[in-house]
Image: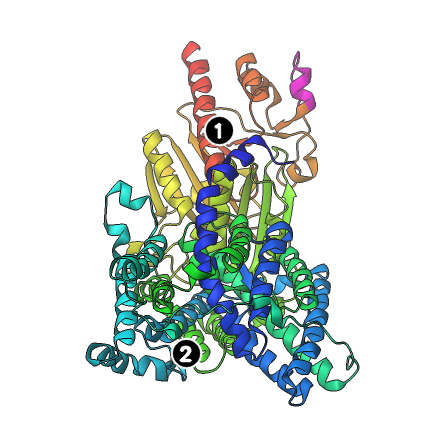
Amino acid sequence: MPNKNTNQQFLSTLPQNIFSGFVVSLIALPLGLGLALASEAPPISGIIAAVVGGILLAIFGGSNVTITGPGNGLVVVLLTAITTLGQGDVRLGFAYTLAAIVLSGLIMVVLGFLRLGILSDFFPSTAIQGMLAAIGVGIFAKQIHVMLGNSDEHGSLVTLLMKIPDTIQTLCTTDNTSFFYAGIVGVVSLLIMIFHAKIRNKYFQLIPAPMWIVVFAVGMSYFFQLVLKQEHPIDQKWLINIPNDVFSTLSFPNFGIIYQAKFITAVISITLIASIESLLSIKAVDQLDPLKRRSNVNKDLKALGVATMVSGFLGGLNVVTVIARSSVNVNNKATNRSSNLFHALFLLIFLLLFQSQLKMIPLSALAAILVFTGYKLAAPSNILAVSKVGKEQLFVFFATLLTTIFTSLILGIFMGIITTFLLHIIMNKNVVLFFRNMLKPNVLMFKETDGSYYVSVKNFSSFVNFYRLKNKLNLIPENENVVVDFSRCSFVDNTVMENIHTYVDKFEDQQGNFEVIGLDLHGAATTHPFAPRNINKDPKLNKELLLTKRQKNIEVIASDFGWSYTPYVEESMHWIEEFNYFKTKQVQTTKNLLKNKNDALFDVVFTEGAFIARQLIRSTMLHINLKHSIPEFTIDKEGLFEFVKQYTEFADIEIPNHPDFNKRFYLSGIDEMAILEFLTDDIVLFLESNSYYHIESNQNGLLIFKKERLASVKEIKAMIDFGLRFETLIKEKYARA
């Protein structure tokens, strides 16, 4: 049951979702009619798909800000199906196609129950951005001519882009008054979209830019009619065209040829294109979502399938997730699925009550909104943002962009996937890393004794296997503490880095704590937080330190405690091998050194030595350098004897009058009497009242650590605090002596 805060949030955002649904409906209305006509289907069939999809997906869907309706990618498939199945009889062909649409919806429901929505996790982040840019170019190229008053221009995207100067010249020199006024309305509408945010008047800002465009377009029509007593200056063909009786052309499915090969082929084609287009659009819109939420794609697939079946039975086209209208939805600050519902309801209201007013709106005004949306998707700033992640990402971006423009959306995203995978092999210079470990489980998750979740990732983590990590992380409540360890992972790509960043934000929003460790062992080509990380690459970039988020937080901790911080340690630290713990281990490297006069905290990488299979172990340890000599001893949590006995041969020492300590801790050492004398009541009580740590003395100092893994920032602060208080107790003991 929704809580009070959720209801309040829903109500507070209701006005902007209503308005966003209204704006999207203005675009969906002509697009729905146009896509249906382009498929040689009855015009109302496109509106049926939008209305049914909007209502059912708002109730049963698993996405947040997507808009559903008829899709561009299905026009050719549906046109082919209608032509082929009807053998020249368009009406009969459409009836058969409706049957194919119903069955394709049923298959999508099955795909959702089989959880094949996981396919959306296999799309690289940069390839998605390239696809968005290609869609933006497509929207811009097709709609800018309409915006300038020329709705008759057709051709490929390249042809349409090349003809823009001709359309501008025609607008400036035309004697056609209708053409001229349509172009002027489009240009003024685009200027409203561009400069709306720059006008700081708070009353002006109460009305969003698309609404100003509607007010301007309808107001101009009434001005000519009521004030100038003239007809609308723009010809009817440049205005929104709504049939007077849109419900007169309804059709219903005909299952008469369900067993024929051509019918089965049509079903498979429709299902394939609808599923892929929806998955790609859902993935892309998730990236556009300002709140960076992630859709439940399996739930959405099932809802899309049900909506498609209902739409087909009512005479409508396939219901798919549409990127262009979803982009408009996001740009108008929609926050949840209710905007999809309102877009559907407004379509019904417009058709039933406001046909005369809608017919006053020029297509050029709506095209201006789409031109602005298309430009934002394909803006040069987006290319610059991709290059900041890494110059190599531009290859993926442009491979996806150009392939999509010159071929199709599906081929474009496949090219992006292939280019990304090949790029990863080249970056790592290691084919074996990917092909040997691609199918192996690489994520381990368990709950630690302190209640926090520990997730370890090994081998590599990229768009190819990110779903494994995602599935684990999605099981963790967002108000919990999580540590994700990449120290055993050789390569982490930008798709994973971007998604991890999203998880950090999500957990922070819910008062949880999501920390990433181990990435400071890796190098990157740029300082961008989403840059791919490679453990074989030097972490230093152009002689400047490339710090991870963890390192930057450690730097803050050092400043808070008044300690110095050295991310990449150059000095020798062989003194740590003087502790018994390291007798059977070989230190490889140390990093992230925090120091004051007596103490040092550091990350250390070591192996178990020659007697055990060599395995790298990473841990965060604190060393306290003591001014007084103390007895050698080891303190650990009771029950870890198998862990402890590898570096000590001594029995557990019992402390008189401290049964709780004896029950909870394992204490060993050479000189039992000296150890008992050292462990005063104050020290024993201190150890009992704090978290468990492995504590080892080598007479001159203490080695303290908690786990055989790198510590999170939160754990580092706790360890330093523990060590300083323990050191103070020891000083007080010898001061009294």
10 Å crowding of disc 2: few (<14), some (14-19), many (20+): some
N-terminal of the two: label 2 or label 1?
A: 2
Q: Is residue 241 above or below residue 469?
A: below
Q: Is residue 680 above or below residue 427?
A: above
519 falls in the magenta region: no
Identify the magenta region.
653-663
In this orientation, does residue 713 appear? yes
Which residue sits at x=63%, y=47%? 445
How far across and how far down the image is residue 185, in percent? 28, 65
How far across and how far down the image is residue 8, in percent? 51, 34
User: Where does the N terminus fall, quadrant-wise?
Assistant: top right
Please give the label number shown on residue 699: 1
- Three-letter code, disc 2: Leu
Q: From this viewpoint, which residue is outermost toward the left? A: 173
Q: From this viewpoint, which residue is outermost toward the front? A: 229
Q: Nearer the viewer, residue 173 or 157?
A: 173
Element type at mark 2: helix
Quarter where residue 154 is shown = bottom left
Q: Nearer the viewer, residue 566 or 138?
A: 138
Please give the label number shown on residue 48: none
In this orientation, does residue 535 appear? no
Gap between marks 2 and 1 measured at Cα: 68 Å
Which residue sits at x=43%, y=72%? 396
Q: Is residue 437 above or below residue 624?
A: below
Q: From this viewpoint, which residue is outermost toward the top? A: 736
Q: Which residue is mark 2?
A: 402
Please state if 579 lies on the left or on the right of 643 as rendered. Answer: left
Which residue sits at x=53%, y=76%? 37
Element type at mark 1: loop
